[in-house]
Amino acid sequence: MALALPPALDRILRAVEKPGRYAGGEFGATIKAEAALRVVLSYPDLYEIGMSNAAVRILYHELNRLSDVACERVFAPARDFEAALRAAGEPLRSLETHRALSQFDVIGFSFGYELTLTNLLCILETGGVTLEAGERGPREPIVIVGGPAATNPAPLGVFADAVFMGEAEGWISEVFADLADMKRRGAGRGELLQRLQSEPAVWHRGRAQPVRRAFWRGFAACEAHTMLPVPSIRVVQDHGTV
């Protein structure tokens, strides 16, 4: 069920190009009212490109299968929407529940290529999240980056609290279930971040060399699921995948 838009966001969407990029409410989206750990995933580009990214859709499904994790999505704002948000003093919000990004526990980026780094920073800034990892406060989200362009993690260390190296399938469910359990028992940002950074495949500024996680070979043993968000506007890869 789609949630009502905040009044300020509703007014902005009436004046920008392709409001479907930001309105949410797609068929197949997962909305959880109650969960210990709230995560928002992003491919740092426009909705039409991000919704064509297989990694975001796979991880979205994997995280929402966990009973105590709520996973939502956000993508980069186009220039007109970004300008309107800044002019109105409104934050960039998630598609599912329209929460400001600063209200999540974890922001995860699937970082596909280097030129989207400026988009990643724009998403953080317009979402109300401090750009530099070393300056984030105890109530701000943990920012974790993974994907093909994170192969050399050092340049991301200024902005990312953690950089995951390798294939997240088969890893993310176990680790994020632990994080949700810790959060349910009262753990704060520092403890959650310490748990993430203890993983061998997670690079951070205090670690010289991570151990890249090997390719996951468990797809053949998994059930096929089709209940994923259906884009509300035409996307770049406008076809089914097998």
Image (spheres, helix red, strand yellow):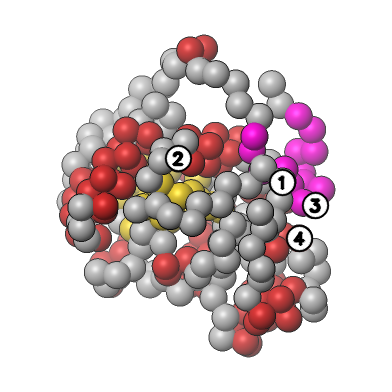
Where disc 4 sits, the SS reads helix
Of labels 2 and 1, earlier in sequence is 1
Q: Which residue is identified by label 2?
A: 63
Q: Which residue is identified by label 1?
A: 27
Q: Position of residue 37 (x, y in %)?
A: 36, 52
**Which disc number belongs to residue 20?**
4
* In the rendered image, the vertical position of residue 117 relative to residue 213, given as above or below: below
Of labels 3 and 2, earlier in sequence is 2
Q: Position of residue 16 (x, y in %)?
A: 78, 74
For marks 3 and 2, give the CA distance. 24 Å
**Which disc number belongs to residue 107?**
none
Disc 3 residue type (three-letter): Ile
* In the rendered image, the vertical position of residue 153 relative to residue 84, given as above or below: above
Q: Picture quarter containing residue 12?
A: bottom right
Q: Residues within 10 Å of mark 2 (few under 14, many from 20)?
A: many
Q: Which residue is identified by label 3?
A: 233
Residue name at image x 48 percent, y 12 percent: 221
Circles 1 and 3: CB atoms closer than 8 Å: no
For marks 4 and 1, give the CA distance. 13 Å
Instruction: Name the main secondary structure of what is drawn in magenta.
Output: loop
Q: Magenta residues, as a range?
A: 227-240
